[in-house]
Amino acid sequence: MFRLEKIIVYLFVACNLVGSRVECTENSRSVCLLQDPPNQCGEFCLSVLQPLLDHIVTHQEQWNTSEALRLNET
């Protein structure tokens, strides 16, 4: 058990070190300003998020059917 706690602490420290390094490099990067964000990013973001949205819809359908079954039982 002690070994697992030790590993978790090391992982936490490593993540903090990586995070602080990322913050330093982000300040030196240039910023790309978008002229028309909905048209430039909208389709890409939607395509990336589509699997997540499908997963949510599936669980909502399961929730609705289980809720309907529960109401029918009572």
Image (cartoon, helix red, strand yellow):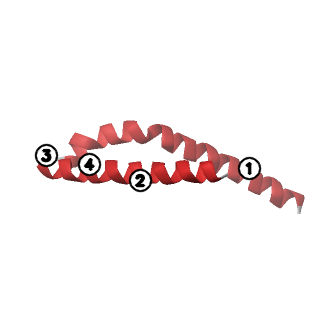
Between marks 2 and 4, how big is the CA–CA gap? 14 Å
Q: Which of pointers 1 and 3 indicates the residue nearer the eye? A: 3
Front of the two marks 4 and 3: 4
Q: Which residue lies furthest to the front in this view?
A: 2
- SS at badge 3: loop
Mark 4 vs mark 3: which is more N-terminal? 4
Mark nearest the camera among 1 and 2 is 2
- Mark 2: which secondary structure? helix
Determine which residue is flagged by label 2: 13
Q: Which amino acid does label 1 sit on?
A: Thr
Tell me the distance, in whole angstroms, between the alpha carbons under discs 1 and 4. Answer: 45 Å
What is the number of the mark on residue 22?
Answer: 4
Most distant residue in the right direction: 73
Q: Name the residue under label 1.
A: 65
Any mark on residue 56, and which? Answer: none
State which tag comes first along the sequence, 1 or 3.
3
Of mark 1 and mark 4, the one earlier in the sequence is 4
Looking at the picture, how far across and down is residue 30, in whole percent? 10, 46
Q: Which amino acid does label 2 sit on?
A: Val
Q: In this view, does 67 lie above or below 53?
A: below
The image position of residue 16, as x and y in percent, is 37, 54
Q: Going by the image, does 55 lie left or right of 61?
A: left
Q: Are marks 4 and 3 in contact (CB under 8 Å)?
A: no
At label 1, counting other C-alpha atoms closer than 10 Å, the crowd grade (few under 14, some 14-19, many 20 or more) is few
Secondary element type, mark 4: helix
Q: How crowded is mark 3: few (under 14 residues within 10 Å), some or many (20 or more)?
A: few
Residues tagged 2 and 3 counted as in contact (Cβ below 8 A): no
Nearer to the camera, 60 or 17 = 17
User: Looking at the figure, which quarter contains the C terminus?
Assistant: bottom right
| Spatial separation of the CA atoms under disc 1 and disc 3 | 49 Å
Q: Which residue in the protein does label 3 denote?
A: 29
User: Could you tell whether 44 is left or right of 5 in the image?
Assistant: left
